[in-house]
Image: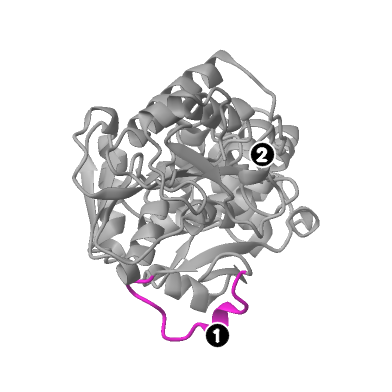
Amino acid sequence: MSQIYKDGAKVLKLIKTKNIGLKGACFKLKRNVRPIYALINKILPVRKKLENEIQKKWKDCEDIELASLMLFDYWKSGKISGGGAVKHKIMEKFKPSKFLAKNLKKQKRWVIINQFKKPKNTKILGKQDEIIPDLYCIEDSAEIAKMIKNSEIISQEKASCMPVASLRLKKGNWNAIDACAAPGNKTLQLAGRMKKLSTGKIYAYELNPNRFGLLRRRIKEYRADNVKAINGDYLKAEIPKNVKVAIVDPSCSGSGIISHQLIDNGKITVQPDLVTERLKSLSYFQEKVLTKTLNIPGIQQVLYSTCSVHKIEDENVVHNVLSSFWRKFKLVKALPKWKRRGFGDYGELMVRVNPLEDKTQGFFVALIKRRSLRLGHHIIKRTHRYWSKKKHIKFN
């Protein structure tokens, strides 16, 4: 039996526990990370249906994850790699079928150019995204796979690129932080933007040792020499000097991630108003991370984002934290060209992505900037006395 099937089945079982995402589960493997990720990513939209087919004809199947992977390959290519009892059972019980042709749509993926190792030929990527620079929506091919393997392009969902694209960066000598960095997509994207604008560094924090190892490997692989990875608790960390920009993308429910929903439910749902004890606990942690970041001396802009569709992790976190910081900070409109906006009084300033309608993962983005020391055209410093007279909370 092919080792890819064995390891792929382990990954499917891992992500079914809800404790880890597809990428994180794949990077726990010591080999064949990319082919296994590609295989499971293809199988997820039809996983439930495949399992139903197996349960109909092979009721006493002991490893349904392994059987699903092998049956998928059999119906897709007409063959199963390697040998073994599971292969013989599938060949015996299942005939060649047009099941996948009926149930699988032709897949496209989003990729963004690696600014540290740019591809020589970008024409193959087609038309650049209208909102996010260097982002492309492409169909898989051997040449695309080679570019990804060579780290010339990074496979990254459009929604995941939105937070860093929202930042309004200026030239200068300044540092940045990524408070919860692994697996590192946003870190690498910001590193690419900073390369052209700042001589400073990104300090990327990750508490989990395994995820930190993944973060370090990716930084090295993509040659992002302006990133310093730190294995530690951001909430307890002493922040470096001259930090002007921060990304806060803390642990969340992952309810906007399509693969999570397909694993859990076999379908995609959007429930913005859902509140559970787990969501309350997550939102408490998210507020702590955002609060610590806004307390950094001299911080100029903070990007808060989640891959959640729930208000309790999104607009509510921003509202609760800014209620204590509104005199110093304000919301500014993130990605003005993006049509879908947030909920509530200041929802128009925030970004929402709907996984059912926007052809990418569910996401939330809010851009928070330090208020200017000027009031209108007058040179009036906003002193404590000035703000103490302000009674009405204002976020913009």
Relative to 246, is 195 above or below? below
User: In the rendered image, which residue does mark 2 sit on?
Assistant: 347
**Residue 39 placement: quadrant:** bottom right
Taking depth in this image into account, of 343 and 391 the one nearest to the observer is 391
Q: Amino acid at mark 2?
A: Gly
Most extreme residue toward the top, as rendered?
A: 277
Q: Residue at x 27, y 48 (%)?
A: 243
Taking depth in this image into account, of 327 and 177 the one nearest to the observer is 327
Q: Position of residue 201 (x, y in %)?
A: 24, 57
- Within 10 angstroms of label 2, few (less than 14), some, or many (20 or more) residues? some
> Which portion, as a residue range, is magenta?
115-129
Q: Position of residue 266 (x, y in %)?
A: 69, 37
**Residue 329 placement: quadrant:** top left
User: In the rendered image, which residue does mark 1 sit on?
Assistant: 123
Q: Residue at x 74, y 59 (%)?
A: 105
Query: Residue 123 magenta-drawn?
Result: yes
Q: Residue at x 21, y 43 (%)?
A: 230
Tell me the element at label 1.
helix
Relative to 197, is 36 above or below? above
